[in-house]
Amino acid sequence: MDSVDLHVHSTASDGSLTPRQVVAEAKAQGLRALALTDHDTIDGLAEALTAGCALGVEVIPGIEISAHHEPGSMHILGYFLDHGSPQLEAQLRILKQARADRNPQIVAKLQKMGLAITLAEVQQASGGGQVGRPHIAQVLVRKGYVATFQEAFERYIGNHGPAYVSKFRFPPQEAIAMIRAAGGVAGLAHPFTLEYSSSGHLRQILTQLVSWGLAALEVYYPEHTPENQELYRHLAQEFGLLMTGGSDYHGAIKPEIRLGQVGPGQTVGYEIVEKLKALAGRGEGRGEEGR
Ligand code: AMP
Ligand code: ZN
Ligand code: FE
Ligand code: FE
């Protein structure tokens, strides 16, 4: 089977494998293609593309951008980006700076609460890429302040936790626009994290996103219930969106997730890559296949 994984992280953000290692893992799992979609960065793409060539795995240059949304979180996936785009690079620099400003603030809050943790430890945990809360969680686990990664979020650094610090996020419209301007196709990741109140509410949000150029919806995802999947499939058809799927692989950070597995015994076929390719580079986001 020609399966693919369209949602994957590396050490360029908060995954535990380097871009090259992720591609090697895809090869080992027999995947035909993989989209590297690191949080707010394209820094892993060059290495992944080179490894893809060498190993015979098709690498789709992607990204996962955190967009401003209340109360939950909105992640916009981008596929087939021109990762040499200076404009995209400049926009992502803003997000990098936002993280650099925020991480010491979270660490300071934790220190005030009596936890002996330093920024240097967190940076070390990141393996040199973009630093995020998962790395802070890792350090808290390692130092015994919490028993699990999950507990770190629940007690300290989750969106409602006492050590949480928000950071700048682009509005959804801009996140979609920057992906399209770089020739990419924009899709909404794991819709359930929007914390919508009803299917009607989700439909409202999608109406807006589609008007701004959203062209795909992540229908297949390990945490989606059969009911989620059914609703998202239905909405994708209604709005003419491509149905993508991915594992959100992070390596050792989320050890229960396997590359290419988007649900119990579920995988995604290569056809979707061809459909995304057909839309890419148009800057208009939607085309034949999506209608
Ligand atoms: P950051 O980009 O630094 O704000 O970190 C966001 C990442 O932290 C998300 O992509 C998740 O991987 C992880 N995360 C956020 N909230 C939680 C939570 N409640 N439990 C576990 N992981 C979380
Ligand atoms: Zn992540
Ligand atoms: Fe996400
Ligand atoms: Fe992700």
Image (tube, helix red, strand yellow):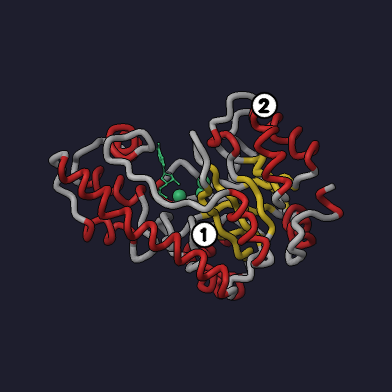
Element type at mark 2: helix
Q: Residue at x 29, y 57 (%)?
A: 125
Is 270 placed above or below 143 here? below
Q: Is mark 1 within 8 Å of ligand 4?
A: no
CB contact under 8 Å: marks 1 and 2:
no
Q: Nearer the viewer, residue 143 or 92?
A: 92
Please name whichever residue, 264 or 94, is drawn nearer the observer in this view of the structure: 94
Image position, residue 248 (x, y; %): 53, 48
What residue is at 80 percent from the left and 36 percent from the top?
A: 238
Give the number of marks: 2
Which residue is depicted at the point 57% across and 52% down?
A: 7
Q: Which residue matches tag 2?
A: 199
Question: What residue would you read off at disc 1?
Answer: 25
Judged left or right of residue 17, residue 83 is right
Closer to the eye: label 1 or 2: 2
Q: In this image, 39 relative to 112: left or right?
A: right
SS assignment at label 1: helix
Kind of residue at badge 1 = Glu
The local crowd at label 1, few if under 14, some if 14 to 19, many if 20 or more residues have their Cα within 10 Å, is some
Residue 89, numbered label: none
Q: Nearer the viewer, residue 127 or 43?
A: 43
Task: Please state the horizontal and vertical placement of residue 52, each as a whole percent of the image.
Answer: 59, 70
Q: Looking at the picture, does residue 257 appear above or below residue 21?
A: above
Residue at coordinates 15% horizontally, 43% vertically from top-left?
A: 112
Give the percent coordinates (x, y) of residue 121.
22, 57
Amino acid type at image mark 2: Ser
Q: Can residue 117 be seen? A: yes
Measured Cα–Cα span from mark 1 to mark 2: 37 Å
Residue 90, relative to residue 172: is it above or below? below
